Image (tube, rainbow, N blue to C red):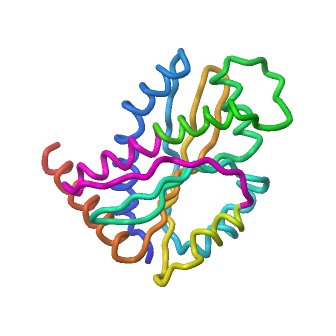
Amino acid sequence: MLLTETQKNGLTEFTKMALARRTAASLSELIGFPVVVQVSNVSLQPLSGLVPEFSELLPNQVATIHQLFTGSITGDALLLVDYYYALMLSNVFRHDSDILPHRLDASACEILTEVGNIVLNAYLGMLSKMLQRQLSFSIPCFDIEELVSLTDSLTIGKNEFRYALVVETLLQFHDKSVPTHLVFVSGVVSISCLIKAIETWASLSVSCS
């Protein structure tokens, strides 16, 4: 399953709408100064292709904020941050110095979980509105793991072929930029429903403009 250029453009514009204003405002309120959320790329690929595709972008351990969603579509929603950038991000929100700590402490993990909660809920909330269906979200959980272990955990026990919708984002704070990856993992049926809903949204947006 590959995205057409029209589908990719629709997904990109939808994601920008979901993250640019409300999410940036919520993060700005949390941190105390302006935050800009940029969407740089959107791609869809088999879950098995996630490791070879992103091994260079996420070569270290990854800070992961993970939510399950159920309803008319079901799957996993995750915010992935490379460990180094996770240290930087937690420092920014705590207004610490530019000297990064060697590891994420309990306070940093709580901050990152809240950031992930804001980003994931903004996207899933707008998606629910687009589908005109109620989605239920689990409480977000935080973990630190290798990308290989993460994809294995999303595959084990699943009887369906799974796809990963990856949104590459950039969180900008003053002179710092933190790359993150927003990942939605689901089966063929749910992914197809998602793409169809976004195609419909894109068509309506064009006709109204």
Horizontal side, residue 2 vs residue 55: left or right:
left
Residue sitting farthest toward the bottom: 159
147 relative to 116, above or below: below
Q: Report whether residue 6 is seen.
A: no
Q: Residue furthest left?
A: 208
- The image position of residue 172, as x and y in percent, is 58, 29
Q: Is residue 171 left or right of residue 3?
A: right
Q: How many numbered marks, from 0 up?
A: 0
Residue depicted at 55% across the width and 79% down the height: 157
The percent position of residue 198, horizontal first and vertical second, equals 28, 58
Quadrant showing the C terminus:
top left
- Locate residue 162 relative to residue 145 in the image: left or right: left
Q: Residue at x 26, y 61 (%)?
A: 199
The image shows residue 195 at horizontal and vertical percentages of 32, 65
Residue 43 among those drawn in magenta: no
Q: Residue 108 or 122: which is nearer the viewer?
A: 108
Percent x, y for residue 193? 29, 69
Residue 141 belongs to the span the image colors magenta: yes
Quadrant location, the N terminus: bottom left
**Figure quadrant of residue 203:** bottom left
Kindly identify the residue that appears in the image at 35 percent across and 62 percent down: 70
27, 140: nearer the viewer? 140
- Name which residue lies at 51% across and 47% down: 140
The magenta stretch is: 119-146
Tell me the quarter of the picture where residue 134 sits.
Answer: bottom left
Residue closer to the observer: 192 or 16: 192
- Res 49 seen here: yes
